[in-house]
Amino acid sequence: MKAYVFPGQGAQFPGMGKDLYETSDKAKELFDRANELLGFDITKTMFEGTAEELKETKVTQPAIFLHSTILATVMGDNFKPDMVAGHSLGEFSALVANGALAFEDALILVSRRAQAMQNACELKPSTMAAVLGLEDHVVEAICADIDGVVVAANYNCPGQLVISGEIKAVEAACEALKEAGARRALMLPVGGAFHSPLMEPAREELAAAIENTHFSKPTCPVYQNVSTFAVTDPEEIKKNLIFQLTAPVKWTQSVQNMIKDGADHFIEVGPGNVLQGLVKKIDRSQTTEKAEI
């Protein structure tokens, strides 16, 4: 069974999507529509901007979403998933790909999400750190003993977990994790504590927008970051999407459940190839590839 997976923030690169725009009339139409909906020329930044310009909050998340969803659309008959999943932001791309969300509605939500997250970041200094070489339960226990807010945020694959929280708490956790035997505990160059309780203002801001957006019955199950299991009920999809901002990204568990349910071929749709690597670290027997037109 084919599982299509969609990347999240960090997968952007200069020139992303330009090949799609130049070779497909359908892609050009969708990119032009995105410029109208967003109220600025995002394609100019995607195609001609620097890596630094692509890191702007209002650009990064919509750019990755556009690259992924437009690629899936252009693939046409070659795009036939049995199941889908997305890493954090990538969940919105997955929900367009399986028909739960309309392209325009999802783009507006992604844009609002980016701004809401930026607003939350400005309320309190916060950050994230990557932890390598420790069991999940060890990382969780150490974070629980630290003064201040610091939690497990991204379960990327066995032995690779990202923590998130207040700067001082994350720094203290990194030191404690190294003492406990972590191969690395490295602060990440991010603007805030994503997928932590510090994103609560963003969750509240986005919740109303999600509640007021129409979700359809999907064509295939989505394995959401919050629940990790196959979901097809539109109301459950909404609920999970609302809690995604403050809950951890359970990518390892999601991929394991997809495999249990029959997935044996993972195809990454969008910029980068990070998810292929993570899938292989979760289960080396899996076939992985990059989506192409």
Image (cartoon, rainbow, N blue to C red):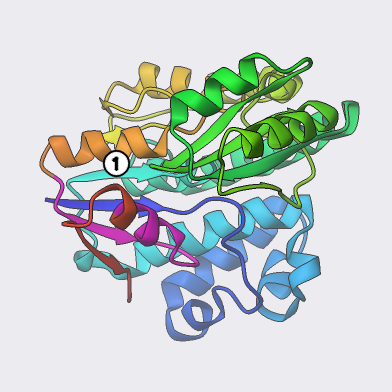
Estimate the x, y position of residue 152 in percent, counting from the top left: 57, 28
How crowded is the residue under tag 1: few (<14 C-alpha within 10 Å), some, or many (20+)? many
Residue at point 58% right, 33% down? 180
Please indicate, yes or no, whether residue 144 appears anywhere in the rendered image: yes
Q: Tell me which corner region of the image, top left, top right, bottom left or bottom right, holds residue 25.
A: bottom left
Estimate the x, y position of residue 271 in percent, counting from the top left: 50, 66
Q: Is residue 109 above or below residue 267?
A: above
Q: Is residue 177 above or below residue 51?
A: above
Residue range in magenta is 263-279
Say whether residue 25 is magenta.
no
Please indicate, yes or no, whether residue 212 appears anywhere in the rendered image: no
Q: Which residue is mark 1?
A: 255
Front in this rendered view, residue 98 or 261: 261
Q: Quadrant of the C terminus?
A: bottom left
Residue at point 17% right, 46% down? 82
Q: Is residue 110 left or right of residue 54?
A: left
